[in-house]
Image: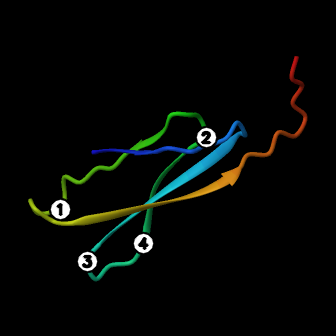
Amino acid sequence: MKVTADVGGASFYEVTFEAKTAGGGWAPIGTDDTAPYQVFHDVAALAAGTAVEYRTQRSRRRMDNCWLR
């Protein structure tokens, strides 16, 4: 399943995606550092109809030793 996040602003971000099912804890499912921010969650092991919640955490990417022209 494709999971996306809209991030405003013009900065360089790293977005970490997490998922959980009822009664479970948050588990990371992937990180993307290029807009459009997205990951693909493999839900094949879940029973049909299982509700899944998603959240993201955004952080600025470090640009050490990077020259922009």
**Label 1 is placed on what type of residue?**
Leu
Residues at marks 2 and 1, CA–CA distance in whole angstroms: 27 Å
Neighbour class for label 4 at 10 Å: few (<14), some, many (≥20)?
A: some
Going by the numbered disc 4, the residue's amino acid type is Trp
Q: Residue furthest top?
A: 69
Residue 18 placement, left or right of 9: left
Instruction: Give the residue type that dot 3 points to.
Output: Ala
Residue 63: x, y in percent?
Answer: 82, 39
Badge 2 is on which residue? 33
Q: Quadrant of residue 11?
A: top right
Side (left or right) of 61 relative to 43:
right
Please report whichever mark, 4 or 1, sits nearer to the chain's N-terminal start: 4
Mark 4 highlights which residue?
26
Tag count: 4
Crowd class of label 1 (few under 14; some 14 to 19; many from 20; radius 10 Å): few
Amino acid type shown at disc 2: Asp
**Residue 1, x across and y down, in percent:** 27, 45
Secondary structure of the residue carrying tag 4 is: loop
CB contact under 8 Å: marks 4 and 1: no
Q: Which mark is residue 22?
A: 3
Mark-to-mark CA distance, 4 and 1: 15 Å
Q: Residue 12: which quarter of the image?
A: top right
Residue 33 placed where, x, y %?
A: 61, 40
Alpha-carbon span between mark 2 and mark 4:
20 Å
Q: Earlier in the sequence, mark 1 or mark 3?
A: 3
Q: Is residue 54 above or below residue 66?
A: below
Q: Which residue is at a point 23% across and 54% down the rendered structure image?
A: 43
Secondary element at image label 2? loop
Rounded to the nearest whole Å, what is the CA distance between mark 3 and mark 4?
10 Å
Q: Secondary structure at mark 1?
A: loop
